[in-house]
Image: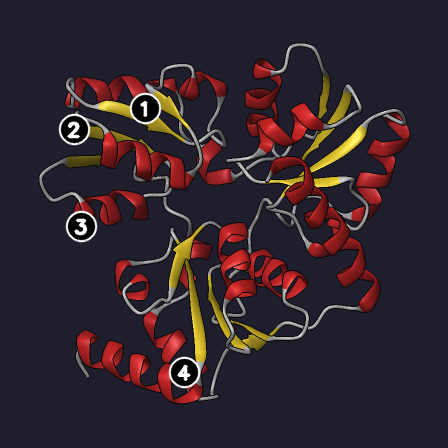
């Protein structure tokens, strides 16, 4: 079958079975084209809450499907490819976090949403890259233990000088792989291009950027900008998506190393087989994890909107 034939069959089956398909912005273009909603992990989960359909397929990684299940406990949530994990979400476990909390007993624990649902049960509040500054600013506690990404944490801390931060030495392996040397090389190749960077990048990269923000923020900025050329310092799928959405502009990857194999694990055929009942994994979380992680996520909504 051709790609468009697979897509048409997916669209037919999701209508017939009354299934909602969510796709993270880092998914491939062919997957985005069959999705009902495209966005970041938390934005997708909120869309799932509003949608009346009782079955959901998440095209993304495991923590995203878990987040969707936490906010939609009465619905059936499928992870299209069960092998799609997240190295950052998996690098900090409960035992290590408990040791950190002993080291920083007076600190509120702020968890990036890129964490497991189990870890969220031991945190005070979650954040996304788009709301992290606002949530941390609104926390009553002036001492914050930010986990697991120190790059996003330092980005937040620089904007909140009145607060004290401690960090865990984690982060996204892909975003951490690019350096100022990559920026200088890209600027030499594309001297007229603006650099748009995700705060998961190292400070030496974000310090060079013309704009720093979440994936959705980067895409919105590129679309609205009068500039015609952009270097994109986040997962390379965004270069492809923006090229499709803004064919009159040019987009360049900062580095080929900004390609997440876990995000690429989910394919159009995974969605196809999931809809046929021949693939995917239904998310099921223990009650105490469901309740504890839900508290952490709801607190984010309260503080960050």
Q: How far is disc 1 from disc 3 in space, using C-alphas?
A: 25 Å
* C-beta proximity under 8 Å, tags 3 and 4: no
Q: How far is disc 3 from disc 4 in space, using C-alphas?
A: 27 Å
For residue 273, the mark is 4
Say whether disc 2 or disc 1 marks the residue closer to the N-terminus: 1
Q: Which residue is mark 3?
A: 244
Q: Quadrant of the C terminus?
A: top right
Provide residue 288's location: percent of width, then percent of height: 84, 62
Provide residue 13's location: percent of width, then percent of height: 35, 86
Residue drawn at (69%, 73%), measured in percent from left and top? 284
Helix, strand, or loop for circle 2?
Answer: strand
* C-beta proximity under 8 Å, tags 1 and 4: no
Say whether disc 3 or disc 4 marks the residue closer to the N-terminus: 3
Q: Residues within 10 Å of mark 2 (few under 14, many from 20)?
A: some
Name the front one of labels 2 and 1: 2
For residue 229, the mark is 2
Say whether disc 1 or disc 3 marks the residue closer to the N-terminus: 1
For residue 182, the mark is 1
Name the front one of labels 1 and 3: 3
Residue lying farthest to the top in this orientation: 161
Say whether disc 4 or disc 2 marks the residue closer to the N-terminus: 2
**Residue 254 appears anywhere in the view:** no
In the picture, measured across the screen, residue 81 lies left or right of residue 75, that is left
Name the front one of labels 1 and 4: 4
Query: Which of the 4 image quarters holds residue 222?
Result: top left
Q: How far is disc 2 from disc 3 in space, using C-alphas?
A: 14 Å
Q: How far is disc 4 from disc 2 in space, using C-alphas?
A: 38 Å
Provide residue 27's location: percent of width, then percent of height: 36, 57
Helix, strand, or loop for circle 1?
Answer: helix
Residue drawn at (30%, 85%), measured in percent from left and top? 12
**Residue 291 appears anywhere in the view:** yes
């Amino acid at each position: 079958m051709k790609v468009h034939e697979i897509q048409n069959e997916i669209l037919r089956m999701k209508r017939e079975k009354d299934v909602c398909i969510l796709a993270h912005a880092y998914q491939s273009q062919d997957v985005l084209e069959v999705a009902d909603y495209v966005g970041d992990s938390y934005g997708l989960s909120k869309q799932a809450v509003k949608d009346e359909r009782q079955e959901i397929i998440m095209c993304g990684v495991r923590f995203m499907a878990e987040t969707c299940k936490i906010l939609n406990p009465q619905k059936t949530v499928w992870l299209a490819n069960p092998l799609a994990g997240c190295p950052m979400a998996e690098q900090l476990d409960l035992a290590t976090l408990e040791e950190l909390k002993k080291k920083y007993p007076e600190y509120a624990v702020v968890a990036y949403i890129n964490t497991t649902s189990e870890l969220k049960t031991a945190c005070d509040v979650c954040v996304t890259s788009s709301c992290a500054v606002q949530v941390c600013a609104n926390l009553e506690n002036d001492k914050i233990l930010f986990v697991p990404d120190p790059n996003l944490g330092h980005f937040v801390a620089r904007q909140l000088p009145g607060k004290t931060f401690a960090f865990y030495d984690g982060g996204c392996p892909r975003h951490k792989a690019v350096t100022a040397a990559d920026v200088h090389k890209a600027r030499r190749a594309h001297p007229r291009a603006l650099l748009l960077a995700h705060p998961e990048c190292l400070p030496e990269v974000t310090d060079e950027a013309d704009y720093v923000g979440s994936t959705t923020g980067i895409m919105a900025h590129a679309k609205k900008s009068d500039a015609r050329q952009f270097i994109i310092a986040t997962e390379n799928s965004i270069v492809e998506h923006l090229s499709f959405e803004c064919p009159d502009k040019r987009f360049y990857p900062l580095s080929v190393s900004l390609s997440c194999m876990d995000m690429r694990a989910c394919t159009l055929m995974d969605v196809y087989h999931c809809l046929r009942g021949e693939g995917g994994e239904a998310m099921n979380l223990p009650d105490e994890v469901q309740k504890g992680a839900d508290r952490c996520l709801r607190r984010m909504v309260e503080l960050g909107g």
